[in-house]
Image: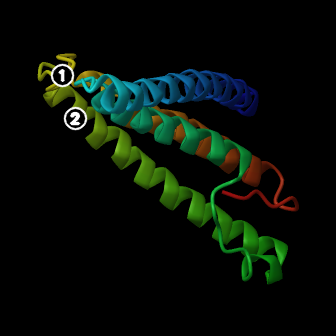
Amino acid sequence: MIINFFEAASRFCDRVARFVLIVAGALMAVIIILQVFFRFFVKIPLPWSEELARYLMIWIGMMGSSLALSEGRHIGVTFVMERLSGRIRQVLTIGAILAVFWFLWLVVREGGQVARINYTQLSPAMMIPMLAPYAAIPVGGVFMLIQVFRKLLLVLRDHRNPVSL
């Protein structure tokens, strides 16, 4: 069944996102501590540390957004939705999910274009392909699309149990 496929895909995305968040967060913390040490005590700042920390933050933001979407932790205004009947709530929830799906599809499409256009460009300090930071946008977008589609299937399957975005 299609819902089972998207449940499994959602769990996979969650595991990958958690792994990226842990590794990138730990790496960013170590890099920033090293940068502070080298800048203020050794008096020779690391030229690549700020750039790498910035790129890691992009990945953390995109993977964190996917995980938050999966767990229903994004901010939302539920005041009106909680007061609506089941059918009206389902229709509005489906509309909201479709709007988010459309937006994320644009993020994936345009982010993929930006990554493709800039894949040969090198970063100024580390001289790595800019594909590395730019890829976070379409990859994170695909992860979020999977989460949103799973939520859509859940709403369509059971309208009595509200699903939050």
Viewer-side residue, 50 vs 149: 50
Q: Quadrant of residue 83?
A: bottom right
Q: Determine the residue positioned at 81% across, 77% down.
A: 82
Figure check: 95 above or below 16: below
Q: Amino acid at mark 1?
A: Tyr
Tell me the SS state at disc 1.
Answer: loop
Q: Amino acid at mark 2?
A: Gln
Q: Quadrant of residue 40?
A: top left
> Counting residues from the N terminus, which is met first, the one under dot 1 or under dot 2?
2
Residue 136: horizontal and vertical position, in percent?
A: 39, 31
Q: Determine the residue positioned at 64% across, 27% down.
A: 18
Residue 155: horizontal and vertical position, in percent?
A: 74, 54
Judge whether residue 134 can be spotted in this image: no
For discs 1 and 2, the disc positioned in front in the rendered view: 1
Residue 29: horizontal and vertical position, in percent?
A: 51, 29
Q: Quadrant of the N terminus?
A: top right
- Which residue, given by chain and number where applicable, does mark 2 sit on? 113
Viewer-side residue, 16 vs 61: 61
- Which residue, given by chain and number where applicable, does mark 1 sit on? 119
Q: Determine the residue positioned at 17% across, 17% down.
A: 127
